[in-house]
Amino acid sequence: MPRVRRNKIKRRACTGCKRMGHNFRTCPEKMMTSEIDQEVADVFVEDDFTETSQIETAQIETTKKYPKVVICDDKKMMKSPHIVNLRGQSIRKFPKVEAYKEKETIKNIVGVDFASLIRTANNKRREEMNNKTISGNFILKEELNRKQYIKNYVEETKDRQKTNFKVKKINKKVFKQDKNKIKESILSKFSSKLQLFKTKLIFSFSKLSPSYWLKQFTWKRLAYQSIVIFLLVAIPMPTVGYFQQVKLTNDQIMEGSKQALFGLKSSTFSVLNSDIDGAEQGLNDTLQYFNNTKKILDSENKVLMSVLRAIPILGNSIKSRENLLNAGQYMALANTYLVKGIGEATNGENLNTTDKISLVSQHLKSALPQYQEAYNQLSLVDSKVVPEEYRGEFNDFRTLFGVFIEDLNDLVQLTDTLSLILGSEDFRRYLLVFQNNNELRPTGGFVGSLAVVDVQKGKIDNIDVPSGGSYDLKGQLDTYVAPPLPLQLVNSRWEFQDSNWFPDFGASAQKMAWFYEHSRNTTVDGVIAINATVLERLLKIVGSISSEKVGLELSGENALEDLQYQVEVNYNKEENKPKEV
C-alpha cells in the first residue's frame, strides 16, 4: 500500500520567548516583566528614602532593555563650510516701490426698511388701478358686476355684426358693376379682331384672281425671279462636287497620318533594338509622310478649311486632326535628334566614354523641346477623331508619353552627373565597399570587401582590391577612436569594418572615407556601396560570367552561394588571399 504523504502543520511560536503554545500577548514572561515594573514604580512613589541598593536590585531583576537616546545640547552649532547657496543673493528690483494699500474710507452703514417700501409701492398701484375706467385700455372684472359686463359684451358683438353685413352688401354691388364692364370690354375687343380677320381673308382671296397678277406683272420683276430660280438650281451642283473633293482630301490626310505614325513606331522599335540604320530609314520615311500630308492640308481646300474651323462641331474635329499631325512631326524630329546622337556615339571609335556621354546629352537636350511640343499638341487632340480600333492605344500612348518626357529630363541630369563622376574634368578616386546583406548593418550589410578604383576620362586606370578585405585595414589607424556605446560590448576600438554605423548613408560614407584616409594615408573623392543582391539582379540582366583563372561561373541564381563557397572554402591556402576572387 503506498504511503500517504501528509503536510505537516507548522506551529507558530511566541515572538518574545520563542516558545510554542502561546503568543506574545499571553506570554508569561512578558506579564512577569510588567508586574516587576509596576512594583518598582510603587517603591519610588511610596518610600522616598529607600536604599539605593534595593532600587538597583529591583532594576537589575527587570529583563526588559530600553534603547539608549543620545541628546545633544550644543546651542552653538557651527555652520558647515561646504554648504553652497544655489539660489544666490536675492536682489530687490524695485526697492523704492511701496506695497499697495487700499485707501482708508469711512463706511456709512444705512438701514433699509423694506416693509415701508413695499407698503408704499402697493398703495401706489392701488391708486393707479382705481383711476382706470371702463372706456380705458383695460377693463377689470372687479369694477363691474357680472351682469353689466355681459351686457356690454353683447352690445359690442351686435355692433360688429351690423358693420360686417353692410360691407358685404356694398361689395356685392361693386362686383356686379365690374362684371358688366369686363363683359363689354371683351366683346368689343373680340369684334374688332373678327372684323380685321374678315378683311385679311377677303384680300388674300383677291390675290388668286388673274386680274390681280396682270396688274402686278413687270419685266424687271420677272428677271429677278428667273435669276433666283437659276441660282437655286445651279449652286448645289458644284457644292456637292466640292464636298466630295474635301472628303477625298480628308481620306488622304488620314491615310498619310496613319502611315507616318506606323513609320514612327517602327523607328522607335529599331532604336530600342540598337538598329540605328533601320531607325534612320524609318524616320526619313515618317518625315516624308508628314510633309506630304501637311502639304495637302495647306494647299488644297484652304478656304473651306478655314470656314469649317469656325463651325463649333466640325471645327473641333479639324483642329484635333491638325494637332495630331503637328504632334507627329515634332515627335519625328525629336527622334531624329536622338537617333543621330546615339549613332555618332556608337560609331565614334576615337571618342572616350565621357565624350560619348556628353555627345548623347547634347542631342537629348535638343530633342527635349521637340518632345515637349509634341506632347502639348497631343493634349489638344480629341480622342474621338481617332479611329475606334486605335483609340484605346492612342490614350495609353498619350499618358505614357508624358511619363517618358519626365524620365528624359531626369536622364539629361543623370548624364551630366555621370560624366562628372567618370572624370570628364579631372582624375577621380573612389572607394567601393561591398556589403553583405546577410550580416545586417545600418547601410545595408557588413563591409566584408572593398576596392579602390582610379578613373579618368571614363577609363579605369587602376583597381586595388585588398586580399583580406576590410580587415586589411585593421590595426593601421593612426589614432584611437572610441566606438559607439552599443559597439563597446564587442569591440574596444572603432575601425574601418564597423564604420558604416549610421543609417544616413551620407554620414556613414564620410566616416568610411575618414577611416580609410587615416589608415592608408590617402584620400578618396567618393564612396560607393554595393549590396550583394545588386550582383544577382545585374547578372539576371547581363547574363552569366565566368573566370578561367579561378574556374568559376556566376549566374543570377547561384552567384552569392558560389562566391561564399569560393571565399571561405575553395581558395588557395598558400597565398591566403580569398578576397581576390
Image (cartoon, rainbow, N blue to C red):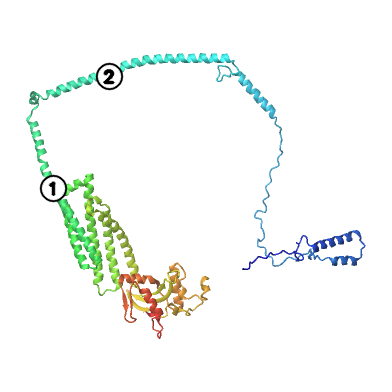
Front-most of residues 74 and 1: 1
Q: How many marks?
A: 2
Q: Position of residue 159 (x, y in %)?
A: 48, 14
433 horizontally vs 230: left or right: right
The tag on residue 538 is none
Res 521 quadrant in image: bottom left
46 horizontally vs 362: left or right: right
Q: Which residue is mark 2?
A: 186
Q: Measuring 29% from the left and 63% from the top, which residue is drawn there?
A: 365
**Whether residue 185 is visible:** yes
Disc on the earlier residue, 1 or 2 = 2
The tag on residue 244 is 1
Q: Position of residue 564 (x, y in %)?
A: 39, 76
* Residue type (three-letter) at the residue carrying disc 1: Gln
Q: Position of residue 316 (x, y in %)?
A: 23, 48
Badge 2 crowding class, 10 Å Cα cut-off, few under 14, some 14 to 19, many 20 or more, is: few
Indicate the quadrant containing the C terminus: top left, top right, bottom left or bottom right. bottom left
Res 272 quadrant in image: bottom left
> Element under label 1?
helix
Q: Measuring 25% from the left and 18% from the top, which residue is drawn there?
A: 188
> Element under label 2?
helix
Q: Residue extending furthest front?
A: 1
**Whether residue 452 is visible:** no
Front-most of residues 325 and 424: 325
